[in-house]
Amino acid sequence: MAISEDAPRDIEAYLALARAHGDTSDSRDQVTDLEAIARVAWRLMTEAQKAAFRLDAEILALAEATGDFADEQNADF
């Protein structure tokens, strides 16, 4: 699939690209792509946006669901 640099995309389009990569190669590639997307988004966020992200109900629920596992993985929240 040819991707135009001028085409506006929302997050769903990027998630679809990651899914397609996993479907056409190895499912681990999808995870790697999703991690790369998250890292770029984080790098581009302002400190205020990062703070809002950390306090979002979905993110707080995810952090609570992972419990001590995140701490064991040396996650830097």
Image (cartoon, grey):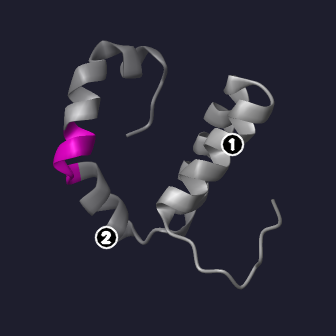
Q: Residue at x 25, y 61 (%)?
A: 52
- Pointer 1 residue: 20
Q: Position of residue 66 (x, y in %)?
A: 31, 20
At label 2, the amino acid type is Ala
Indicate the quadrant containing the N terminus: top left, top right, bottom left or bottom right: bottom right
Would you say residue 50 sits in the magenta stretch? no
Q: Is residue 42 visible?
A: no
Q: Of label 1 and label 2, which has the lower sequence position?
A: 1
Q: Residue at x 77, y 77 (%)?
A: 4
Q: Position of residue 30 (x, y in %)?
A: 65, 35
Q: Which residue occupies the extreme left position in the image?
A: 57
- Pointer 2 residue: 48
Q: Residues within 10 Å of mark 1 (few under 14, many from 20)?
A: some
Q: Position of residue 67 (x, y in %)?
A: 26, 18
Q: Residue at x 20, y 52 (%)?
A: 55
At label 1, the amino acid type is Ala
Nearer the observer: mark 1 or 2; the answer is 1
- Classify 53 as above or below 3: above
Left or right: where 71 falls relative to 8:
left
Indicate the quadrant containing the C terminus: top left, top right, bottom left or bottom right: top left
Left or right: where 57 falls relative to 1:
left
Magenta span: helix, strand or loop, mainly?
helix
Q: Residues within 10 Å of mark 2 (few under 14, many from 20)?
A: few
Magenta highlight range: 55-60
Q: Which residue occupies the extreme front position in the image?
A: 1
Q: Are marks 1 and 2 in contact (CB under 8 Å)?
A: no
